[in-house]
Amino acid sequence: MSEEHTGHCLCGAVRFRTRGPLREVIACHCSQCRRQTGHFYAATNVPDHALTVEGGENVTWYRASDMAGRGFCRTCGSALFWKGDGTNYTSIMAGTFDLPTGLAIGKHIFCADKGDYYEIEDGLPQYAQGY
């Protein structure tokens, strides 16, 4: 996998670049993630020092809980980031990266809360809550 990745929101108002390896993608099926994206959240993450954001003034942060913020483009509404309070990394939605990503889903979390309209049948580890 390349050591540098780029990506952006749907309209291009927010662009980002990462340096260094990306974590495997984690698919989160909790109700907050499903409501924000319309399906499940699929995200990797990078240390904050390895993330550069252009157009950061176009990122709006929404706090759906008392433990994290969800960053999205204020122009087109694209879900982009998830940032846990007090963490030194930022999760980035896998679908916002330019191709090729070299990414793959590694596990599913909050499966007890998943939507009733789909099954998880890829054989990867599934956790009822977090892992």
Image (cartoon, rainbow, N blue to C red):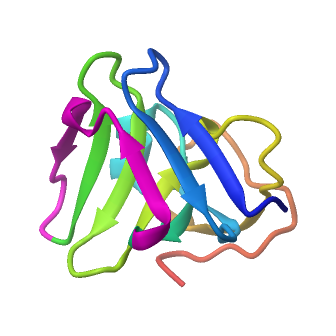
Question: Total of numbered circles in the picture?
Answer: 0
Magenta segment: does it hold 95?
no
Region of the chain picked out in magenta, as a range: 49-66
Locate residue 78, reporting x and y percent. Answer: 41, 28
**Residue 27 visible here:** no
- Vertical placement of 109 versus 96: above or below? below
Position of the N terminus by quadrant: bottom right
Locate residue 113, reporting x and y percent. Answer: 46, 59
- Vertical placement of 76 versus 118: above or below? above
Locate residue 77, reporting x and y percent. Answer: 33, 23
- Vertical placement of 72 versus 89: above or below? above
Magenta segment: does it hold 61?
yes
Locate residue 109, reporting x and y percent. Answer: 56, 69
**Residue 109 visible here:** yes
Position of the C terminus by quadrant: bottom right
6 lies left or right of 34 = right
In terms of depth relative to the viewer, which is nearer, 12 or 116? 12
Residue at position x 48%, y 79% in the image:
130
In terms of depth relative to the viewer, which is nearer, 84 or 14? 14
Residue at position x 72%, y 48% in the image:
119
19 lies left or right of 63 = right
- Quarter of the image for residue 56 reads top left
126 lies left or right of 52 = right
67 lies left or right of 94 = left
Residue at position x 70%, y 68% in the image:
24
Residue at position x 86%, y 58% in the image:
122
